[in-house]
Amino acid sequence: MADITHGTWIKDGKAVDAVYQNGRQVYGRNLIHDTSFERDMWHNIWNNSTMSITSDGNLKFTIPDTHQAGVGVTTDSLAMGIYTLTAKVRGHGQLQPYVMYWDIGNYGIYSISCPMINSDTDFVGIKYTFALKDKDPAKQYAFAILTASAAGNWLEIKKDSLKLESGNKATPWSPAPEDILN
């Protein structure tokens, strides 16, 4: 029997990847660690953005110049396949999610275009479904959110909203099982 622990499904002390009810997926494992931004796992990962946790517990970063910059968290290897990314974001700049690789460059996971976020107050819901293919999973090292274009552009990711899950179905936010089990 699987238990739900703080929104994450655990069975026999191990994470469950998906849960179905009446043939419909109702839970997908969050593959990004520390999406509550409480474990100090997120770091400046590209071009020295300024990063902080807001008084509301959200992750906010600002880029220093007109180049791309952003923040990230180390990740477990992602197999080649279909994934869905969801989040709530506010700020000024394009939301550019990436899977980053040692020695072979970065793979932007957006497929058509990055949405321009232009809101100081309201969080914008985003959803990407994408195929991760033709890259070596053994060389993956981080999941990152970047923005670009203008010095001072910033993005703020709402606490408990960022989720990357296997498949093309978005399910409600849940923490990564590793965040609960550790």
Image (tube, rainbow, N blue to C red):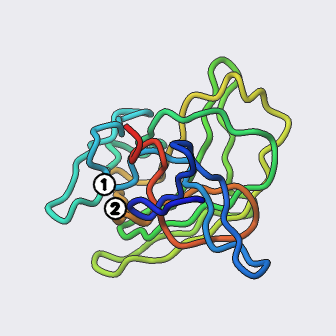
The residue at the point 57 percent across, 69 percent down is 115
Considering depth in this image, is 52 or 85 the residue closer to the camera? Answer: 85
| Quadrant placement of the C terminus | top left
* Number of residues whose C-alpha sits closer than 10 Å to that of mark 1, classed few (under 14), some (14–19) or many (20 or more): many
Q: Residue furthest right?
A: 134
Q: Amino acid at mark 2?
A: Glu
Q: Seen in the image, is 2 located left or right of residue 108? A: left
Q: Which residue is mark 1?
A: 59
* Number of residues whose C-alpha sits closer than 10 Å to that of mark 2, classed few (under 14), some (14–19) or many (20 or more): many
User: Label 1's element?
Assistant: strand
The residue at the point 53 percent across, 52 percent down is 10
Q: Seen in the image, is 167 located left or right of residue 128? A: right
Q: Horizontal and vertical percent for residue 152?
A: 30, 54
Q: Horizontal and vertical percent for residue 90?
A: 37, 70
Q: Residue furthest top?
A: 103
What mark, if any, has residue 156 been given in the picture?
2
Quadrant of the rendered structure where residue 59 is?
A: bottom left
Q: Seen in the image, is 31 located left or right of residue 64? A: right
Q: Horizontal and vertical percent for residue 93?
A: 44, 62
Q: CA distance from mark 1 to mark 2?
A: 6 Å
Q: Is residue 92 above or below residue 142?
A: below
Q: Are marks 1 and 2 in contact (CB under 8 Å)?
A: yes
Considering depth in this image, is 152 or 126 the residue closer to the camera? Answer: 126
User: Label 2's element?
Assistant: strand
Q: Amino acid at mark 1?
A: Leu
Q: Is residue 77 above or below residue 36?
A: above
Quadrant of the rendered structure where residue 150 is?
A: bottom left
| Quadrant placement of the N terminus | bottom right
Q: Earlier in the sequence, mark 1 or mark 2?
A: 1
Q: Horizontal and vertical percent for residue 155?
A: 37, 60
Considering depth in this image, is 129 or 163 the residue closer to the camera? Answer: 163
Q: Residue furthest left?
A: 55
